[in-house]
Amino acid sequence: MKKAIFFWILLVTIPVFTQSRSEEKIPELLSLNDKQVAELKASLKGNVVLVNLWATWCGPCVKEFPHLVKLQKLYEKKGVKVVFISVDEPEDVQTAVRPFLQKQNVTFTTYVKNGDDESFIDAVGSGWRGAIPTTFIFDRTGEQVATLVGARDLNAFESAIKPHLE
Amino acid sequence: MQRFLQILLILTLLLGKEAIAGKDKPIVKLDGKVPNFTLKDYAEKEHSLYDYLKSKAVVVMFIATQCPVSNAYNERMVDLYKSYTPKGVAFLAINSNKQESIEEIAEHSKKHGFEFPVLKDWKNVIADKFDAMVTPEIYLIDSTGVLRYHGRIDDSRNPAKVTQHDLRDVLDAYLEGKPLPKQDAKAFGCTIKRIDQ
């Protein structure tokens, strides 16, 4: 069932750019609207999930980003999933977001916000007002267990997820 | 005995932490009375919120010098000030970012032609009371000191893409004595860098 939902999301989300299948190093960048946020969260149940909201224009986000990439690599086998959602403007995706992802050696699927900001903010986190960077942490049951507002480092992210890894 | 002391120490730390958290709990809520505060601007002049309640309304704006979103609104904040000050609305900007100095705030204000006071909120005390999280973030307070609107200026940091002028619409309705079209509107922005981060 989880797989079915996951593949459904892959089908309904629109790839932001067409890219050659031979360019396997380029991570997939999918557009995500407010309605698809819940589906994405549901598809990731069973994992410890960190949903990070960021933008290329946000200095603290850029500083924090490599720590989350490293966390994903270190904890992938323990069922940890980092989900990056860029809130950059559509016109900045090709010129700023994709080059940044490549520079950061991101090899997994990431997302870029699509549609109305306010409904997207409400869909992502209850009580959240759109400040970035913010990282929401969900345990394996899909329950939101932490909200980290502001930039963090690898140690802080490790401390936040460790109680939920077992 | 040692175990007892350990528990006592843990309890003391926990209670202490709770006491500190409790002190800074947000106390500003929509349709609620906003408590007075006094802060100094970059020229060391004191400004008290309640001194501005003789105006028809006060727009409190949490802003930043380094945040690209806040900076994208510099001209729009100046325009709002110029449009609504003659109509009896007062404007107060607050900078609560720990890393942005008085000197930086002064230079930034002069560079962008801010005629409204920009107050320094040391240790983000007022941001905590308002529960302000992002820059820019707006609070519209009426002449009785009640919070009437909380949120964004408009719906895009790119002026060319704005479709909803939330703050202008709210101000116009308020000044005409009409029901406000909305009281809360969110937008993406930079986190306020607090002393505990």
Image (cartoon, grey):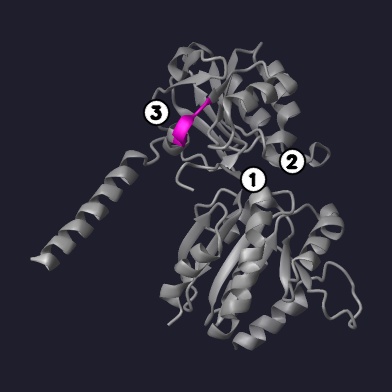
Question: 10 Å neighbourhood of mark 1: few (<14), some, or many (≥20)?
Answer: many
Q: Residue at the location (76% across, 75% down)?
A: A12
Camera-near label (1 vs 3) is 1
Q: Is residue A27 above or below residue A113?
A: below
Magenta-highlighted stretch: main secondary structure? Answer: helix
Chain letter of the residue beneath label 3 in the structure image: B
Label 2 with label 3: CB-CB less than 8 Å: no
Q: How many numbered marks does the figure carry? A: 3
Label 2 with label 1: CB-CB less than 8 Å: yes
Location of residue A147 in the rendering, given as x and y in whole percent from the top left corner: 49, 59
Q: Is residue A85 above or below residue B122?
A: below
What's under tag 1, amino acid-wise? Ala
Chain letter of the residue beneath label 2 in the structure image: B
Chain letter of the residue beneath label 1 in the structure image: B
Compare marks 1 and 3 and give the one earlier in the sequence. 3
Q: Which residue is mark 1?
A: B187
Location of residue A58 in the rendering, given as x and y in whole percent from the top left corner: 69, 49
Q: Which residue is mark 3?
A: B33
| Secondary structure of residue under mark 1 | loop
